[in-house]
Amino acid sequence: MTIPPSSPVVLLHAFPLGPAMWQNQVAALAGRKVLTPSFPGFGGRPPGGSSLDDFADAVIADMDAAGIERAVVVGLSMGGYVAFRLHARRPERVAALVLADTKATADDEAARAKRTDQAERARRDGVGWLVDAMVPVLLGATTRAERPNVEKLVRAMIANADPEGVARALLAMRDRPDSTQQLADIRIPVLAIAGDEDQVTPVAGARQIADGVPDGRLVVIPKAGHLSNLEDAKSFNGALMSFLQG
Ligand code: MLT
């Protein structure tokens, strides 16, 4: 199956960031219709809903409002988890999937317990602590050593996150279903992308996606961590554009 030329592109952001993380991709996609939804509780959108299905429905509502019937859906990390739910609920709205630095599997018990603790802490203490907790895991070692502007941007985005939005997203990610069984039913082109320094969703998760869908391919970006689109925008955009162009 091919991707319709000039198909609209929907870019789904990671946790606990917002659509500003896509600035380099929006520039690269100039000339196409591009939508960068904020999940409830992020990017100035009020918190609402309590599951990733609710987040997927918010994206569908944004697509409806923008007059987008069908799009290539690009999701990074939490955005990828939502992309799986969006495809499960409304497959006819998805022309192709780009699943970046994400995984199909659900959280194990230890990860679920950590999400619960972090959600309680966000509600109690706000998000200041989250900046130092997350930056070292979100960014790869090369970016931390060589790309101070990326770290500055990521720190600012996390510091601006809404505590209730953060808490709800953590609980929604905690309770997300395993999408592994769904992979074989995703009968559209799929590109999995992973930074080879990604500690949150290592390359093996992206490989599982690429191998598990009928029409998958994998691009590994060297010297990039979990936020591969920000850490090496040139390589990420190159992979995205060549996928879109078939
Ligand atoms: C993200 O980048 O969206 C999150 O780190 C994903 C996760 O915590 O599983």
Image: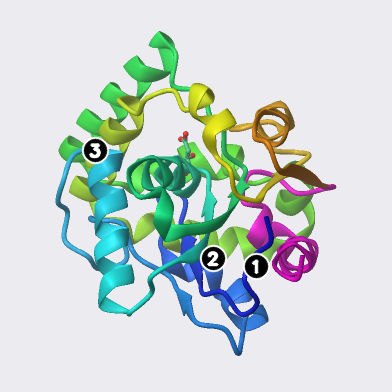
* Sequence-first disc among 2 and 3: 3
Q: Amino acid at mark 1?
A: Asn
Residue on which disc 2 sits: 153
SS at mark 3 in the image: loop
The residue under the point 80% across, 44% down is 220
Q: For residue 51, which numbered disc appears in the image?
A: 3
Q: Residue at x 31, y 50 (%)?
A: 56
Mark 3: give few (<14), some (14-19) or many (20+) Cα within 10 Å: many
Image: magenta residue range: 221-246
Q: Is residue 181 visible?
A: yes
Tag 2 near tag 3, CB within 8 Å: no
Magenta stretch: dominant SS? helix
Residue at the disc numbered 1: 149
Identify the mark at residue 223; answer none if there is no mark.
Answer: none
- Spot the residue most to the front: 1
Disc 1/disc 3 C-alpha distance (Å): 33 Å
Rendering quarter of residue 44? bottom left
Q: Amino acid at mark 2?
A: Leu
Judge left or right: residue 166 versus residue 195.
Answer: left
Sequence order check, earlier mark of 1 and 3: 3
Cβ atoms at labels 2 and 1 below 8 Å apart: yes
